[in-house]
Amino acid sequence: MTSEHDRTPSVQDNFLQTLIRGKTTVNVFLVNGIRLSGQLTAFDQFAVLLESGPAVQLVFKHAISTVLPVNGGGQAHEPIEAPVSGSKTNPLRGRVR
């Protein structure tokens, strides 16, 4: 059985570590729609620390929907190709209501 430390870092770990090292300002969107802004300072398996001015917030990962770097910071160096599911085109794509 492999332990947590024996596995290679995940995409999530790499992304968060890049944001921390770059001191990138991020918007963290929660599943309830609330937006938090600040810099990530640390993370573990269950939570992230978000620093905003003098305050530090502990945000549980299960409450996070999206982490978005502000001003394009923290972008991947190489694009990652994602498999396209299904061969049908989406007729609703691009429609504006």
Image (cartoon, rainbow, N blue to C red):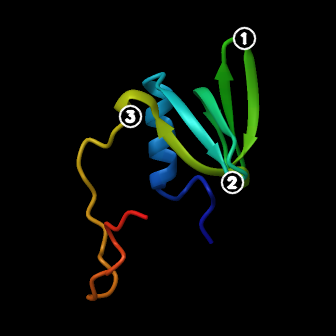
Counting from the top left corner in percent of width and height, residue 31 is at 69, 54
Is residue 1 left or right of 8 when viewed as pictured? right
Quarter containing the N terminus: bottom right
Q: What element carries label 2?
A: loop
Above or below residue 24? Residue 35 is below
Above or below residue 30? Residue 22 is above
Tell which of 95 and 10 is nearer to you: 95
Counting from the top left corner in percent of width and height, residue 71 is at 38, 28
Q: Residue at x 72, y 11 (%)?
A: 54
Counting from the top left corner in percent of width and height, residue 79 is at 24, 52
Q: Residue at x 74, y 22 (%)?
A: 56
Q: Is residue 3 visible?
A: yes
User: Cα distance, mark 3 to mark 2?
Assistant: 22 Å
Q: Which of marks 3 and 2 is nearer the N terminus?
A: 2
Q: Which residue is drawn at 71% across and 55% down?
A: 62
Above or below residue 82? Residue 87 is below
Image quadrant assignment for residue 91 = bottom left
Image quadrant assignment for residue 93 = bottom left
Q: Is mark 3 on a helix, strand or loop?
A: loop
User: Cα distance, mark 2 to mark 1?
Assistant: 25 Å
Q: Residue 54 carries which label?
A: 1
Badge 3: residue crowd in 10 Å (few <14, some 14–19, many ≥20):
many
**Kind of residue at badge 3:** Gly
Q: Is residue 9 visible?
A: no
Q: Name the residue under label 3.
A: 74
**Kind of residue at badge 2:** Val
User: Cα distance, mark 3 to mark 1?
Assistant: 23 Å
Q: Earlier in the sequence, mark 3 or mark 1?
A: 1
Q: Mark 2 points at which residue?
A: 31
Closer to the observer: label 3 or label 2?
2
